[in-house]
Image (spheres, rainbow, N blue to C red):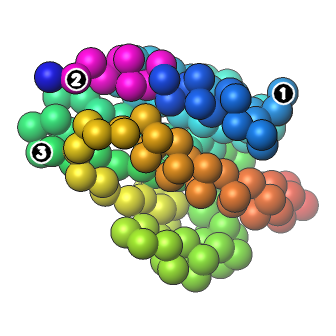
């Protein structure tokens, strides 16, 4: 059994070394659970707008894990924010292999990935790098709901 915590430590290192990673990006890494978010996304208590992935006992048993974009309870005007963001990027997200726009509850989009340990940190990095391209759209949706 591969140590998931070491995979997530390696992922965190890859993220912080990415050319796009700057002082506005934040990482919350709890070992088997990681969030990537911008400082302005109301996620200081892990309840705002994060890109999120986790590989805990349930995911190991199912041999698959999620990569998600959430808008949780600390997100301003949560329901309206989700509607605005889905309107802006729904088609783009749905064009990405394996991604589904959800738009209900707090999940904006999700992809389930097979749990294969080969190059897992790199695959996670690739998916989070893809999701982070939604950064401008998230900022735009936040602007719209705060008007």
Neighbourhood count class around disc 2 (C-alpha, 10 Å): few under 14, some 14–19, many 20 upward: few
Q: Position of residue 34 (x, y in %)?
A: 48, 30
User: Disc 3 versus disc 2: distance between alpha carbons?
Assistant: 16 Å
Q: Position of residue 62 (x, y in %)?
A: 12, 45
Q: Position of residue 128 (x, y in %)?
A: 55, 47
In the displayed structure, 113 sits above or below 22; it is below
- Residue at image mark 3: 62
Give 86 or 54, whichever is nearer the viewer. 54
- Residue at image mark 1: 23
N-terminal-most mark, 3 or 2:
2
Q: Secondary structure at mark 2?
A: loop
Between disc 2 and disc 1, the foreground one is 2
N-terminal-most mark, 2 or 1:
2
Q: Residue furthest left?
A: 61
Prevailing secondary structure of the magenta residues: helix
- Residue at image mark 2: 2
Residue 37 lies left or right of residue 139; in this view the side is: left
């Amino acid at each position: 059994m591969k140590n998931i915590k070491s995979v997530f430590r390696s992922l965190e290192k890859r993220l912080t070394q990415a050319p796009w990673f700057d002082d506005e990006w934040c990482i919350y890494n709890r070992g088997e659970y990681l969030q990537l978010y911008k400082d302005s996304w109301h996620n200081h208590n892990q309840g705002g707008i994060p890109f999120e992935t986790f590989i805990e006992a349930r995911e190991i048993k199912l041999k698959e894990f999620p990569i998600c974009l959430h808008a949780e309870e600390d997100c301003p005007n949560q329901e309206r924010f989700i509607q605005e963001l889905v309107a802006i990027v729904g088609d783009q997200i749905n064009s990405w292999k394996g991604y589904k726009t959800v738009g209900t509850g707090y999940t904006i989009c999700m992809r389930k990935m097979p749990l294969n340990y080969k190059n897992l940190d790199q695959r996670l990095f690739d998916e989070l790098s893809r999701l982070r391209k939604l950064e401008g759209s998230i900022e735009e949706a936040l602007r719209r709901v705060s008007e």
